[in-house]
Amino acid sequence: MLSSPIVLQMPPELQMTDEQFFEFCQINRDLRIERNQFGNISIMSPTGGKTGYRSGSLFGELYIWTLQNGTGICFDSSTGFRLSTGAERSPDASWIKLERWNSLSEEQQEKFVPIFPDFVIELRSPSDNLKPLKEKMVEYMAEPGVQLGWLIDCKNRKVYIYRPGMAEECLENPTTVSGSPVLPGFILNMSKIW
């Protein structure tokens, strides 16, 4: 298992089109692959057991709320989204309002989603450095449509909350985190995550 992502810097003449990058990701399904706005590719190995359990718990809680609420759909960590900068990212869990999702064509829904979610969660694994994750959250908040983001740092028992145009908020060892008003009634019990 890789302890941190491998970053491949790609010269301009070797840049992949969106279609080629999608295909590259499909034939390397065992890896988490992202591409930044400069075309550089980050390759991450599958997570360890604890991180996988935490990520599964996050997605499970969001999925249950999504079914009950009915106003959007949620995605797991294997879903790729294309940012307005051209970067492709895969948040650990995310949610999009139905009207935004339904505005996409069938083809757009099948490939990397060309809009970014309304709500995103990133989970810090033990090998992750905090600074790049915070930079990624700032990148997310600059995207049209994004309303809320959580960066969950299990190592330090902190949850960083991001909203467009607002300063980062840090919760120290919270027992719960609320998604309201973006996700009304969604409350994540942190005892399932810590």
Image: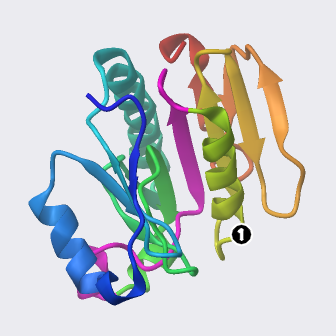
Instruction: Identify the residue shown where x is 43% and y is 67%.
Output: 40
Residue 75 to residue 84: above or below: above
Nearer to the camera, 63 or 191? 191
Q: What residue type is labelled 1?
A: Ala
* 49 sits to left or right of 103: left
Q: Which portion, as a residue range, is magenta?
A: 105-128
Please say whether residue 181 is visible from this viewpoint.
yes
State the residue in front, 185 or 146: 146
Name the outermost residue toward the left: 27
Indicate the quadrant where residue 190 lies: top right
User: Residue 128, position in %: x, y?
Assistant: 52, 31
Residue at figure coordinates x 32%, y 56% from the top left = 33
Of the 4 image quadrants, the one containing the C terminus is top right
Q: Residues within 10 Å of mark 1 (few under 14, many from 20)?
A: some
Q: Position of residue 115 (x, y in %)?
A: 49, 76
Tell which of 14 and 181 is nearer to you. 14
Instruction: Classify residue 141 as left or right of residue 126.
Output: right
According to the picture, the residue beneath numbered tag 1 turns out to be 142
